[in-house]
Image (cartoon, grey):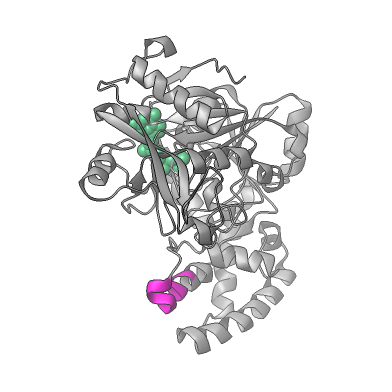
Amino acid sequence: MVKAIVGANWGDEGKGKITDMMAQEADIIVRFQGGANAGHTIVNNYGKFALHTLPSGVFTEHVTSVIGNGVALNIPLLFQEIQSIVDRGVPRPRILVSDRAQIVMPYHILFDQYEEERLGGKSFGSTKSGIAPFYSDKYAKIGFQVSELFDEELLSEKVERVCQLKNVLLEHLYHKPQIVPGELLATLHDYRDMVAPYVCDVAAFLDRALKEEKTVLLEGQLGTLKDPDHGIYPMVTSSSTLAAYGAIGAGLPPYEIKQIVTVCKAYSSAVGAGAFVSELFGEEAEELRRRGGDGGEYGATTGRPRRVGWFDCVASRYGCRLQGTTDVAFTVLDVLGYLEEIPVCVGYEIQGEVTKEFPVTAKLQKAKPVFEVLPGWKCEIRGIRKYEDLPENCRRYIEFIEGQIGYPITMVSNGPGREDIIYRKSALG
Ligand code: GDP
């Protein structure tokens, strides 16, 4: 049985917490896309962790953590991350790395920086982790697969060939130092030695696991609105954030994905540039940002302050639809307990017309939010474990949003910890 855990919005919805929680009843967790550019924050009995590359199952001893072929694999960062959790008392996790995963090269990170410098104020808000240059090279067929590290002849020939190309750009476009092929080859030899014990034919491994009736979780990064096709292009990431891509980025048949848990936060937050219709500014924003998440809305990888706003039903319905949602996990609800009333964005007004359909980017930039205001519940809801025990206005908020987005909210998260979860039977199924 395969389950996917993905985001409905711009990322940071709390997927890490939900994955860590669902990992208790899973055997294998696979990261299927993205790289070390975003992160998950997880709070459990070992402490508080920010993971960037490792799947959120690494804290659960019986789980095998897999880096799928769809991931942008930064080998030294992966090993630093493993070491950093082991140093804090977490048992050394069982990790497999797909032989078809491609490698983030040192020059990808440099190219990311150089391109941001070149674009100046017109940049796409990159985290400068090399992700866009990495995926560009993957699809231009000049990327390096993990398997290629083990074929010396192929590797040295390819290093020469790729350096020729990169050095033209470095010299003439960016006016930066060139890459020395011999040095790059030596770095790749180090990478090979680091990754060798973990390399695996992941598709074959997963095929066997499914025949043995194991439970596999696919862990997404970011959310629908950062998908290169269905998101707010070009302010998107460079690999698909959709559950459907989980089949490709892990290497398993799409029909095996039986449950798609789409994580939706009880208010909105986003990092980086791009239209954000229900965004809040000024003091109201500052207060929500300060109270938000677990210790404030600041990026897990970058530390950048996140932009915050009211819950956006238009974006979230679209986000859930594209994921193919079977269950919504509604998170960080406890944070809203300070509000007298809570506006919810229920439509977009675009050039005088109100729509509930999430538009393409050019129209999105013209959209103004249409709000409906719900009463707040004005109390702390952390620690509550039963849906019926939530204050009435809190249940009304959940049920109103469920009605607007049209997908069943079956889990409500009311705190960052594993046990801060309320399961709920939805009328929607
Ligand atoms: P992810 O990338 O989707 O995993 O999200 P992040 O880890 O970037 O952001 C989610 C933040 O919210 C983290 O700091 C979590 O610890 C925190 N969090 C998750 N669920 C809850 C919740 O229900 N309540 C509160 N207060 N914090 C939560």
Counting labels gives: 0
Q: Residue 422, can we see it?
A: yes
Q: Is residue 316 above or below residue 1?
A: below
* Whole-percent x, y for residue 198 in the image: 62, 46
Image position of 383 (left or right of 425) = left
Of residue 132 and residue 24, the one placed in the foreground of this image is 132
Chief secondary structure of the magenta span?
helix
Ligand 1, by image quadrant, is top left
Q: Residue at x 26, y 30 (%)?
A: 339
Image position of 368 (left or right of 358) = left
Residue sticking out furthest to the front: 352
- What is the span of residues highlighted in magenta in the rendered image? 112-122
* Whole-percent x, y for residue 297 in the image: 32, 44
* Image quadrant containing the N terminus: top right
Q: Residue at x 71, y 76 (%)?
A: 157
Is 115 within the magenta? yes
Q: Is residue 193 above or below residue 284?
A: below
* Image quadrant containing the C terminus: top right
Q: Residue at x 58, y 22 (%)?
A: 25
Of residue 66 and residue 130, the one placed in the foreground of this image is 130
Of residue 83 and residue 401, the one placed in the foreground of this image is 401
* Whole-percent x, y for residue 313 in the image: 48, 38
Image position of 318 (left or right of 277) = right
Of residue 129 and residue 124, the one placed in the foreground of this image is 124
